[in-house]
Amino acid sequence: MENIKLDTSVQYLKGVGPKMYELLNKIGIYTVKDLLEYYPRVYEDRTKLTPIDEFQKEQNVLFLGTLVKPVTLAYAKRKKILSTVVTDESGAIALLTWFNQVYIKDRLKEGETYLFYGKVSTVSGSRATLDSCSIYDVNQLDKIQGLYPIYPLTAGVTQNYLFKLINSVIDTGLMINEIFSDDFRRYYNLAEANYALRNIHFPKNYNMVNVSRNRVIFEELFLFQLALMNMKEKSIGFTNTNVYKDLDESEFLKLIPFELTNAQKKVIAQIKSDMSSEVVMNRLVQGDVGSGKTMVAAVAMYLAVKNGYQAALMAPTTILANQHYLELSDYFKKLNINVEIITSSTTKKQKEKIIEELKNNEIDILIGTHSIIEDNVEFYNLGLVVTDEQHRFGVKQRMKLSSKGNVVDTIVMTATPIPRSLAIILYGDLDLSVIDELPPGRKPVDTCVVNDSYNERMYNFLRKQIGEGRQVYVVCPLVEENEDLDLNSVEKLYEEYKKEFSEFNVAILHGKMKNKEKDAIMQEFKNNNINILISTTVIEVGISVSNATVMVIENADRFGLAALHQLRGRVGRGSASSYCILKSNNKSAIARQRLDIMRRSNDGFEIAQKDLELRGPGDFFGIRQSGMPEFKLANLLTDAKILEQTQEAVKNILEQDRKLELEENLKIKEALYTKYGEQLSNIVG
Ligand code: ADP
Ligand code: MG
């Protein structure tokens, strides 16, 4: 085919029939571009030509062989057996055999020399045997010799087929777009795009593989980070008008009944330093479950208000927004700071009133769920936005909120301790603060893993705890694709517990309930009028009831470790001993391994790292939740080095050319739009 382009459908390529087209679709290949970006996972070493007299049993060999006799066809049982004998300069001979491939009879001619690749079956003296070797013409030596790409396959598509198909496209001389200027490539030591493409598929040696992979990964990560930066860093190059003069929070601290931990103080100091500078604050506050992030946010909001600005606190669920409101509003009221809350259960009338007051600067702090980023909510002078439990918000939502004020300071709080490499990529150039200390007196949650045969013992244990006045959570996994099924299982569980614990108050909480109902149940639980709360993961984040000491998690193997850690963090919030019972009947090694990590560790960072290693970043965050893309080649765990490089590169390029208008950056901009256009459309100017 002559003029194929990158967006040509692969169905027009020679050798791709309708059936093959469907198979290719199955592995994500629709266009020529998809095909070229279908990268090999590993390579087979075909770098050396091995003389026949050096063959060893089981060895994979690439060799030249001259036929000393024509191919013969014989029948054995139901098989057609084709065989011949070849030799080379060493004088040793190899007996080659194929099964059922009758065409080989015409393919190979006596006296001619061919290139073969295959695995040695036997060697005896100067005689070797090999089955089912691949056959190439000698003039292909240059192409074949090197590392042979091994692609991830689907049934019906063979290595050799993909090899030939990709090869045929590259042979047409089709060029892909080089988006980086020569200077840029030299500075970051990057191979040229077409060189990288060719040599990622058909490298001569491992050095070429590394150089080429490095280039492709660099481009992937570079574009992603550039997109992220553009999305959230509208403020790059902007200076802040709200430079705070008054950074004394002692008035506020006097009201709270405990001393801040050193870690909390450290993070507050970092926030204050942002507030007093001209740089817009973009800070990610990481803190394990229970480390006291809310207080840090409260101090920051207090300072914003004290300096004449409004502040907003955004939580992922109504329950959590309510909890923040309950925890903080009393303190603020004592300081004459006006706090309001908007959630999906706020009535229309209340909401209208709040919106009006916000505009008139009568409300200082607004707490809410993401409904506070709705378009009709306007602030008088929003100065600070705190987003709680960030991993629940997508990048887009973050964007929307920070576009509310002119240039707002942002604090993002997350309870999922994110390994540094991921924090860098997910949060671009946010500054990182870590609350790496729990308030004093907390005991680690005692965790065990059991199956259903322990039910009787578990029930007795729960009885004992409730007898001592404690409360219990029982959590059922939530499968988003099938909410009805979930409801079913949580309701079934509820019936079971009600029957078993007829002497106690058992209640149920799930996502299908109205917000009002949910809030009422949570309130009852907080008041200790409910002994056992059966729930889906709606209680996952942030809920704080210090009298609850037991967390039972059903089908625990169906949760991510980060989620399990979150759930477990719902207990152990007071000074009493707390317990987490992970129930699972899953016997697979990996499931056990994962739950065992939970049993052994109470450290969110350690768990997050292990979870990431076991499940990969996509699952770890939930792609939908994080807006995290799947990369073709980049691996966030192993490519942390390149990640740091691209981060620097993105910063440099935006510093010089924020809108990517310089001649040398136009191709980068084009690539950025092609890849991330949808997300960028209303952001990049
Ligand atoms: P998280 O970081 O998980 O959001 P919270 O902010 O909900 O944690 O805090 C957990 C509990 O610890 C809350 O009841 C809070 O009042 C309490 N707390 C916060 N800071 C301290 C502290 N320095 N000393 C004692 N208790 C604290
Ligand atoms: Mg919290």
Image: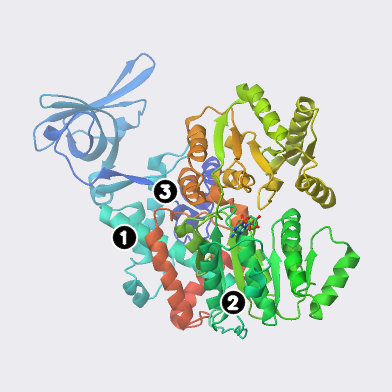
Residue at numbered disc 2 = 234
Give residue 672's position: percent from left, percent from top: 53, 69
Residue at numbered disc 3 = 165
**Does the image show residue 216?**
no
CA gap, disc 1 to disc 3? 23 Å
Residue depicted at 35% across the width and 67% down the height: 192
Q: Which of 278 and 674 is in front in this view?
A: 278
At numbered mark 2, what does the secondary structure look like: helix, strand or loop?
loop
- Relative height, residue 45 to residue 185 (above, below): above
At numbered mark 3, what does the secondary structure look like: helix, strand or loop?
helix
Residue depicted at 77% across the width and 70% down the height: 333
The image's colour scheme reads rainbow
Q: Which amino acid does label 3 sit on?
A: Leu
Residue at numbered disc 1 = 211
Contact? badges 2 and 1 (CB < 8 Å): no
Q: In this view, does 106 lie to the left or right of 287?
A: left
Q: Is residue 182 left or right of residue 533?
A: left
Between disc 2 and disc 1, the foreground one is: 2
Q: Which of marks 2 and 1 is nearer the N terminus?
A: 1
Instruction: Pick the quarter of the image with the C terminus.
Output: bottom right
- Relative height, residue 321 to residue 463 (above, below): below
Q: Residue furthest top?
A: 77
CA gap, disc 2 to disc 3? 44 Å
Contact? badges 1 and 3 (CB < 8 Å): no
| Residue 2 picture quarter | bottom left
CA gap, disc 2 to disc 1? 34 Å
Q: What residue type is labelled 2?
A: Lys
